[in-house]
Amino acid sequence: MKMSSEKKKIFGVILSFLLVFSMSVPVMAEDENYPRYLDDAGLLSSSQAQKLEKKLDKISKEHHCDVVIAVANTTNGQDIESFTEDFYDSMGYGQGEKKSGIMLMVSMKERQWNMCTTGDAIDAFTDAGLDYIGETFITYLSDEKYNKAFTTFARLSDKFLNQAEKGKPYDSGHMPKGSVSPFWIFGDLVIGILIALIWGNVKKAKLKSVKKQVAAQEYTKPGSLRLTMNSDRFVNRTVTTRMIQNNNSNSSGGGSSVHNGSSGTSHGGKSGSF
């Protein structure tokens, strides 16, 4: 059977990865996966790569879902989406019968990235969730802060998997809430106090032009003030209530888009440039 041109390209890339890692990592048992961090472009230092891989291994084992990052020099003309899916499937990544996992692929020549989800990871990482993750690490990727970009992806993957295990994955209208730095809280407080002081001084300055009058009649028109007895009696009250429904339905079109890769495996995902 002849191998298709795209399969040949993928096979060539895999051989390239294997050549690099055969010289840098110890031989693994047959039942173990390939490293969860592969870098054909040498973006990270040795210590950074080892630390990142340990983090990815820890997350993957805790959630029974592979979290993988791979960096390729080029996709050899193949679109980044199918390139990532073929690479994930060919390398045998994924845990369980569903081959659950998420892979971030970065291609340096094309300046493109892709997140590929498989198995249970498709539900854990919705379309909106992948958008959120991509928008978070893309700035670091564009600024060539690769270690920061990859550790951010790993951290958010852990966060999203934790949330999915609670039965309600992050999706449209339900995203992680960012923490506010104490610096900004203090800064806003100081600015608020300064504005209040300035406004108070301005009002005080305007009031200085008013001359104080001792007698009350100085403030009224002669003969215009008449005091009468008046009383109000509370009879009853009417309270109107209405129910405000908490609509948790997915009306905004959440969830995950799924398609079949060249191997027939179902994948979700998100692509972009940097």
Image: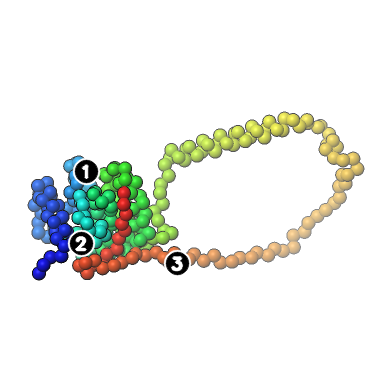
Q: Secondary structure at mark 2?
A: helix
Q: Which of the 4 image quadrants contains residue 65?
A: bottom left
Q: Residue at x 14, y 52 (%)?
A: 17
In the picture, measured across the screen, residue 176 lies left or right of residue 113, that is: right
Residue picked out by circle 1: 44
Please provide percent x and percent y for residue 160: 33, 56
Camera sees residue 166: no
Q: Is residue 63 left or right of residue 3?
A: right
Residue depicted at x 16% and y 58%: 9
Q: CA distance from mark 1 to mark 3?
A: 42 Å
| Residue 16 place in picture, x, y as percent | 13, 52
Which amino acid type corresponds to the residue marked 2 in the rendered image?
Asp
Q: Give coordinates of residue 189: x percent, y percent.
A: 51, 38
Q: CA distance from mark 2 to mark 3?
A: 33 Å
Is mark 1 in CB contact (under 8 Å) with mark 3?
no
* Disc on res. 88: none
Q: Which residue is mark 3?
A: 251
Quarter the N terminus occupies: bottom left
* Residue 86 numbered tag: 2
The first of marks 2 and 1 along the sequence is: 1
Say above or below: 212 vs 77: above
Residue farthest to the right, as pictured? 223
Q: Within 10 Å of the Cα at label 1, are there few (<14), some (14-19), or many (20+) other Cα atoms?
A: some
Vertical side of 62 occupied by 263: above or below: below
Q: CA distance from mark 2 to mark 1?
A: 24 Å
